[in-house]
Amino acid sequence: MSIYTLRYYDQQGLLPFVARNAAGYRVFTDSDLHLLKTICCLKNTGMKIADIRTYIEAVMQGPATIPQRRALLQAHRDRILAAQREVMANLKGVDEKIAIYADPHATDLVEQERAAAKADKIANGLPNPF
């Protein structure tokens, strides 16, 4: 992680747990690095900075916020799974095209697709881009 990212996270209120030494430099403990790893995980899976801040604030408040944290993470997990399903559906489409291009008769298949697209355009009174 770059120093610029650390500074940004600090400016966004994501690092309230990090202490500074007498010279003003951030000093990270093992527990700080554990929380930073969690922040990176949340960010890398698409959680918004505001939601990460909410999560970190809850962590800083102690165990009374466990239900809030769990709900926040569960909602995030649900969004990740929805995005994963969408990616998998799109991957299926890519795989179908790869299978067509890997077919020994790929040229014929592509020409059939083009002819069908051309006929569709003509039938709808549209210009033929092919």
Image (cartoon, rainbow, N blue to C red):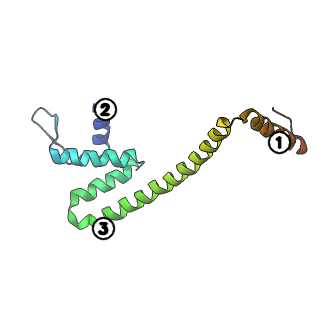
- C-alpha separation, residue under disc 1 versus residue under disc 2: 53 Å
- Secondary structure at badge 3 equals helix
- Secondary structure at badge 2 equals helix
Nearer-the-camera pick, 37 or 108: 108
Res. 4 mark: 2
Nearer-the-camera pick, 94 or 51: 94
- Secondary structure at badge 1 equals helix
The percent position of residue 65, horizontal first and vertical second, equals 26, 65
Residue occupied by mark 1: 116
Q: Earlier in the sequence, mark 1 or mark 3?
A: 3
Nearer-the-camera pick, 89 or 73: 89
Above or below, 59 against 8 in this view is: below
Question: From this viewpoint, is residue 14 visible?
Answer: no
Residue occupied by mark 3: 67
Say whether marks 1 and 2 touch (CB < 8 Å): no
The residue under the point 22% across, 47% down is 34
* Label 1 environment density (alpha carbons within 10 Å; few <14, some 14–19, many ≥20): few
* Label 3 environment density (alpha carbons within 10 Å; few <14, some 14–19, many ≥20): few
Q: Left or right? Give the position of 115 relative to 79.
A: right
1 or 3: mark nearer the eye:
1
Q: Disc 1 residue type?
A: Ala
